[in-house]
Amino acid sequence: MEIDLCQIYTCPRCRMETPHYLQVRREERVAISCSRCQTTSLLEAAELENHQAWWEAELEQILSGLEENGRDDEH
Ligand SMILES: [Zn+2]
């Protein structure tokens, strides 16, 4: 299980995907804080990993969509 210093997560305050910095990791729990508004979120490491995997897949889709200079709508 690897956790980088910077993780993409949904900030409850910004209401969007933002880079988060890992603050504390204790067993299965991690505390991350938004790099934009500094809001700290507490969650499970596995949850963060799942989100990261989801985000990378999403990013791939967005990038492939950008080939035509058009963006995929999330909803
Ligand atoms: Zn934020």
Image (cartoon, grey):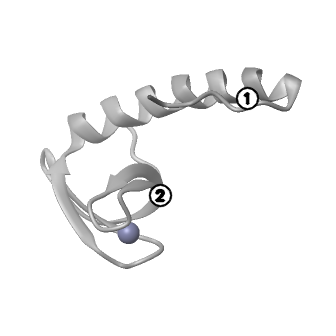
Measuring 78% from the left and 30% from the top, which residue is drawn there? 70
Q: Which mark is residue 42?
A: none
Residue at image point 56% right, 30% down: 73
Q: Name the kind of residue labelled 2 in the image.
A: Thr
Q: What crowding class fits label 2: few (fewer than 14 Cα within 10 Å), some (14-19), or many (20 or more)?
A: some
Q: Position of residue 4 (x, y in %)?
A: 46, 51
> From what the image shows, is residue 62 above or below residue 4?
above
43 vs 54, left or right, is left
Which of the numbered marks, if any, corresponds to residue 63? 1
Frontmost residue, 10 versus 22: 10
Q: Could you tell whether 54 is left or right of 71 in the image?
A: left
Q: Quadrant of the image for the N terminus?
A: top left
Residue 31's quadrant in the figure?
Answer: bottom left
Residue 71 in the image: x percent, y percent? 70, 32
Q: Can you tell which mark lies on residue 18?
A: 2
| Distance in Å between CA atoms under marks 2 and 1 | 17 Å
Q: Left or right: where does residue 71 sit relative to residue 45?
A: right
Looking at the image, residue 29 sits to the left or right of residue 58; the answer is left
Q: Is residue 14 visible?
A: yes
Q: Nearer the viewer, residue 15 or 3?
A: 15
- Check the picture and name the quadrant holding the C terminus: top left
